[in-house]
Image (cartoon, grey):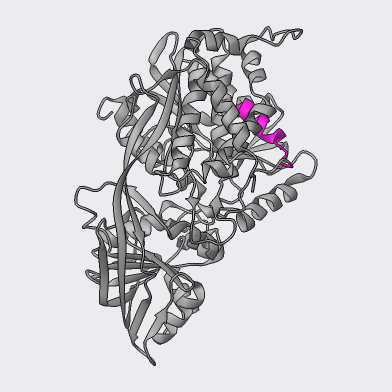
Amino acid sequence: MKKGLAVVIFAFLLTSCGNDEPAEHASAAATTPPAGNTPASDPVELGVEAITEASYRRHVEILASDEFGGRAPGSPGEQLTVDYLVRNFKDMGLAPANGDSYVQDVPLNVNEVINSPPLVISGGEGEDLVLAYPTDQVMWTRQQVPETSIEDSELVFVGYGINAPERGWNDYAGIDVTGKTVVILVNDPGYATQDPELFNGNAMTYYGRWDYKFNEAASQGAAGAIIVHDRLPAAYGWPTVTNSWTGPKFNMVLPDQGEGLAAMEAWITQDGAETLFAKAGLNLLEMYEQAQKPGFKAVPMGIKASAKLVNTVKTIDSRNVAAILRGSEAPDEIFIYMAHWDHFGTDPKLEGDNIYNGALDNASGTAALLEIAKAYSTLPRAPRRSVLFLSVTAEEQGLLGSLYYASHPLFPLAQTVGGLNMDGMNNFGSTRDITVIGIGMSDLDGYLAAAAAAQERVLAADREAEKGYYFRSDHFELAKEGVPMLYPSGGYDDRERGVAYGMKKAEEYIENDYHRVTDEYDLSWDVSGALEDMEMYFKTGLDIANSDDWPNWKEGTEFRAARDAQMNGDQQ
């Protein structure tokens, strides 16, 4: 943990707050090269030179410091973070994007389970089975009420919990689960079988995501929903589950208090699931095999579940932060750069280090957003279109800040040309490739490919497509509404040590640091790759902002219809 940043942060904020120069003067000062240096003759290169290692590192170190407390929504760390972002945007001379304000209020509900509820399984073979919280299971509710429960709720194994009529697949066919508790496998049958003809084969579809499964269970009338954790298809271990689904849980403020949602949602360990299935006289491995086959039929388990959740419930106002560089010719047309500023905050129940600093996830992406914004602010002339710099809240709680923006956009989505999302930057070195999560889905790939080629790099498909990263970050909420969105991520093909090294570093992060208190800034980070990526992202957005093209989703992608409707004036 970095305990010595208080003086650095105080000095920075004191200097910033004492700067009373008009915005245009501050911007001009920022573009003045140091004495003795020759400024770049190419305005694009002038922007590139504004992206510096020292500045990037300073942003990451401050945002990921203990003083910012893990940047949880609604915490003192949120206030520090929002103030930091607003001050930086002002000092760059960028305009507020929400009228005269740099912030967009995002009302959020906060539920926290406070009674460590056991899951009690009755019936079947032997005595009642008691699964402990949080070692055997983690449960919560999205209903926004002080208390929920399930009592003697019949358990039904519904395979992967998927209802996909366009794929001829319905795990709920022929069974009524109203008032019952469904048990669900994580990911989808394509990953399980590695059959390229089944769903998307190894690449996870949205049907494989936990949020889809819980929402589908609720739509089927289930009182409870339990997902069986499995390290590989889930893409993370049990510590990530306990760190991500315990403590305060955030959601949008729901007008009906979430009455239509399940009273209990949960993850269960694989060991716990094996015991659960054995109590029902079933073999978990055999159930895996049955669930992978087309035509699978849900299996009533002959046992019942009971649980009672006691919650604290409150509403807070969190904030998105947004600044804009107005376009010189088409200011009503918008290109978006986005990154989430939040992480998990501080857990008082942990002994010792209890701060989730979120250095890579996502202080690094937020720092990159600031550096790219600075690059734009140095341009002697604004691009043809406007460029929006959007730092959103509550990504870690289910993409809530971007969901709120997508439903309450500061600028019409029909006028939003496209965007680029940054969620974790490369911290291990320069690469020959750049991963595009969702490669081939939109015309935006061509712009990124051109910027990559200038660095003698190539676009590469996600080497970990089974982990479903496309559905796990903020671009997804805008994509669902039709806006073409890029989600690039640092490459794997390290220029010196090759692909195996890049894959090893990615796996080490997931295994050791992802959503853990160990995700901290380290001076040993090699940020050369991050700097290259920022330059690439800057040039990609600039090309789009200077063009009059309207990129679209490719034919056959699930977002094309929404975009076509926008462009035809059918929706905003």
Residue 530 drawn in magenta: yes
Task: Indicate whether 216 appears above or below 273.
Answer: above
Tell me: 176 left or right of 12.
left
The quadrant where residue 245 appears: bottom left
Of residue 331 and residue 107, the one placed in the foreground of this image is: 107
Please tell me which residue is depicted at 51% across the width and 77% down the height of the picture. Answer: 271
Q: Which residues are magenta?
A: 524-537
- Residue occupying the far bottom of the picture: 126
| Image quadrant where one finds the C terminus | top left
- Residue drawn 62% across the image and 47% down it: 520
Q: Quadrant of residue 523?
A: top right
Horizontal side, residue 413 vs residue 424: left or right: left
x%, y% of residue 243?
50, 59
Residue 259 image position (x, y, % from top left): 21, 57
Q: Is residue 317 above or below residue 133?
A: above
Residue 419: percent from left, percent from top:
46, 29
Q: Quadrant of residue 431?
A: top right
The chief SS type of the magenta part is helix
